[in-house]
Amino acid sequence: MSDDAQTPEGVRPEVAAAVGDWRAYVEAKIGFRNHWYPVRFSNELVEGQLITVQVLGEKLLLKRIDGKVYAIRDRCLHRGVPLSRKPDCYTKDTITCWYHGYTYRFQTGELVNILAVPDSRLIGRRKIQSFPVQEAKGLIFVFIGDLDPVPPLNQDVPPGFLDDDVMILGKHRVVNSNWRLGAENGFDALHIFIHKDTTLRHFRTFNFPIGHTPLPGAVKTVEDADGPKGVIDDFAQHKPIWDGEIDGRVVVRGPRSQQVQGTSASVGTSIWLPGVLKVESFPMPGLTQFEWYVPLDAKTHLYVQTIGQQVQTDEERTEFANNFESIYKPHGLDGFNADDIWAREVTEPFYADDYGWVDEMLCEPDTTILAWRKLASRANRGIQTPQDLR
Ligand code: FES
């Protein structure tokens, strides 16, 4: 076998064969297709605006027309150039390729005209690929795949995210690591060690051990046919470690308060297909953090960080928005999660050639990560491959 041999999914075959029942996860280098992914916040795309986004290696054009968002592939059928290189929109619902005039309708992807060849036999008979779009909770979700019918969005988001009384605010940024390192960083029970100096301790009173190991029963998988598929890790069933010792001397202590019993109040995490984390009671009691690791390509992901709070009144909405800007975003999404981003990017080289999946040396708390890899491998709706981008 040559050094650069790869499976159709672009993975080294000996690695894919070695990992057993989570092979599909290793093969999902650019993500799982036939799922919904958030790509931008709704307020980032105003009426008539055209933007480009990348998801699972697909380059898309998004446009809001009469309030509704449409997505088509950013590649002309004629000679394959990106339409976004010089967008020519002569009508509100079409885009004309800048090169030779092929013209597509955003709503359907249909080739509706070739301006310089108006009697072409191709007109009305060809389509550029279009993608289903749905907006929810202030986010624009795009379905990447070809399933028909398209599964409902509520099967691809964590329980509670779409609840009527939950208000969602957030931000996004590009992280230079594969999406799986993002997902595993978030769900990794042991990674709490990196957060021992968090500035969040100045804003809430909580107990934050330097490590914790799930006890039997802490980790559960959820695979209901009509619901989201995920793994839940209940922190209440963990054995915490508060102090780190070397040669009998305490060298590290986790933040610990006399006012709070147990570990980190009711914090628990869960991860759901296609790669979205839910952290309860975080970054403050009464809040829930939902965050996506959206594959852009094999080496980068869009980190979509959101915080949700139940609100009943306009006053509560305003208060949540103010706290989000003054506390939750700077000290949670920016401060606390900065360490996570840094860790993912530094981990990337080890896994970039695939061998990290077999060379890693996991330990006891990492059973949570293995549970996620196995669940994702058996419950996904398909693997995005380089061939899907042709
Ligand atoms: Fe687009 Fe020719 S490449 S019209």
Image (cartoon, helix red, strand yellow):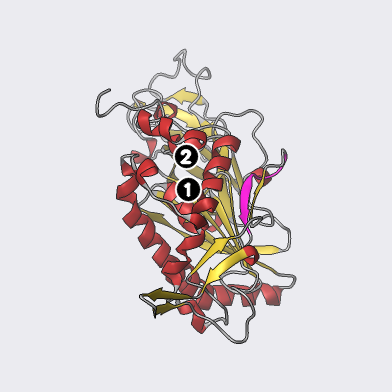
Say what amino acid the circle numbered 2 marks.
Gly
Query: For the N terminus, which image quadrant?
Result: top left
Residue found at x 56% / y 81%: 204
Residue 299 to residue 193: above or below: above
Q: Is residue 321 left or right of residue 122?
A: right
Tag 2–tag 1 contact (CB < 8 Å) = yes
Q: Is residue 29 left or right of residue 170?
A: left
**Residue 357 disc label:** none
Residue found at x 30% / y 49%: 349
Q: Secondary structure at mark 1?
A: strand
Q: Kindly give the residue lying farthest to the left in the view shown.
A: 3
Residue 288 to residue 182: above or below: below
Q: Residues within 10 Å of mark 1 (few under 14, many from 20)?
A: many
Q: Position of residue 46 (x, y in %)?
A: 52, 54
**Residue 294 disc label:** 1
**Residue 31 disc label:** 2
Q: Kindly give the residue lying farthest to the top in the view shown.
A: 121
Say what amino acid the circle numbered 1 marks.
Val
Q: Is residue 157 magenta?
A: no
Residue 149 to residue 182: above or below: above
Residue found at x 64% / y 57%: 218
Which residues make up the magenta segment?
226-233
Q: Residues within 10 Å of mark 2 (few under 14, many from 20)?
A: many
Q: Nearer the viewer, residue 323 or 380?
A: 380
